[in-house]
Amino acid sequence: MKTLYLVAGARPNFMKIAPLVRALRAHCASLDFKIIHTGQHYDHDLNEVFFEELGIPAPDVSLGAGSGSHAQQTAKIMIGFEEACRTRRPDCVLVVGDVNSTLACSIVAKKLCIPVAHVEAGLRSGDMTMPEEINRIVTDAISDLFFVTEPSGVKNLLREGKLPTRIHHVGHVMVDNLLYQRDKLAVTDTSAFMSSGLKSRLGAYGAVTLHRPSNVDTRDALERVGATLRTVAQRIPLVFPLHPRTRGNLDKFGISLGNQVVLTGPLPYMDFLNLWKDAKFVLTDSGGLQEETTALGVPCVTVRENTERPITVEQGTNVVAGTDPENVGLEAFRILEGRGKPGQRPDLWDGKAAERVVAILARELA
Ligand code: UD1
């Protein structure tokens, strides 16, 4: 039997691994899989809570890499993962997304001549100041199999010289997870959720997530974010679950967001879904949330100058507003006035992407 390593390291990986595990268990007797947790994210709020809620089995191997500079973190993951691959050599390593764990493990596998499959391949923002863009480009440069979420990904990979037979437009495993969790949420008692209390207290609200280094790591950028949120919050209260990076920098620079912005810690997946699915809009710099809002038809204003996920703008509810507070405010107010842009769910974002991935892997590894 062939063995597949599934690499998970940071919060946005877990949503993508969960449906792959379900599909592997349900449809693929010919593949054994092991979950390798790099330890890039380790706090209970960013880590265990997702394993529990999303139904991911406990990792088979935990590398415990932890935080650090990009070089430190990537190096620690590489050293740990190399040892794991040498201890028990897999037949294929599957990496998801664009975090440092994705980069580190794909390089290690490739240098050991183990085939690499990349789920969410081909996305490009064109912005080389984004660590994720470097991770995407390097991972795709050395991957053997490309699972793509949207047509732009296919186009980018072909432009970069990849063989068409290696590229598979399968849809989005993260949307599989979203639809699965949304159905579960519909039959869950949410009365103890933090989001339920906030929803009944606030009535109408916007939901915010901002944690990209370009928005939160310098005083100037974070002050611009502060000005943006205070502007928008004059018209509607905002709920902002803070990523540790953002919380740390708000404290460090002494920036206050005013009392119309309700701050919470990171929320579990279901609690956060319960919040944003009913928000008037979502203000975000997250890649995943641009897509999840498109999948459920919730208006999204992206506080960035670009997106690597153009389908969310071409077909979905996403507007890339830049980082100018006035412009972000205009887009948010347009939505509040009922003039937001309608959207549709992209092709193949149907809850079955993981099944397609697993069918292709079973064929390729046979
Ligand atoms: C990482 C990903 C980013 C993703 C984000 C989701 C990279 C380059 N970035 O960014 O693409 O959108 O995860 O959360 O891989 N920290 C904790 N507890 C933890 C983990 C981190 O407090 O469990 C704090 C530490 O101070 C750490 C900082 O957050 O230094 C940043 O963590 P890191 O994993 O380096 O990057 P993220 O900003 O989380």
Image (cartoon, helix red, strand yellow):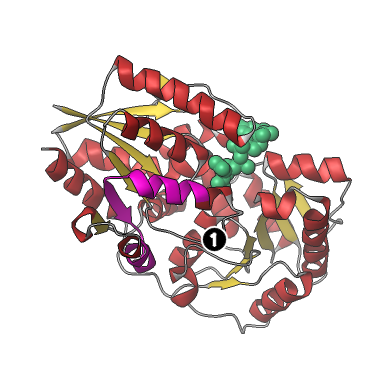
Residue 135 or residue 51, whichever sits in front: 135
Q: Nearer the viewer, residue 47 or 246?
A: 246
Q: Is residue 106 above or below residue 63?
A: below
- Rendered location of residue 78, percent (x, y): 46, 27
The answer to which of 196 and 90 lies nearer the viewer is 90
Secondary structure of residue under mark 1 = loop
Prevailing secondary structure class for the magenta stretch in the rendered image: helix
Quadrant holding ligand 1? top right
Q: Would you say residue 165 is visible in this rendering?
A: yes
Q: Which residues are magenta?
A: 134-156
Of the residues shown, which amino acid type is indicated by label 1?
Lys
Task: Tell me where residue 107 appears, x and y as whole percent.
Answer: 39, 35
Q: Is residue 271 visible?
A: no
Observer-nearest residue: 364 or 206?
Answer: 364
Say if the magenta span includes residue 32: no
Residue at 52% over, 45% down: 269
Residue topped by disc 1: 277
The residue located at (68%, 83%) in the rendering is 337
The crowd level at tag 1 (other Cα within 10 Å; few <14, some 14-19, many 20+) is some
- Placement of the N terminus among the 4 image quadrants: top left
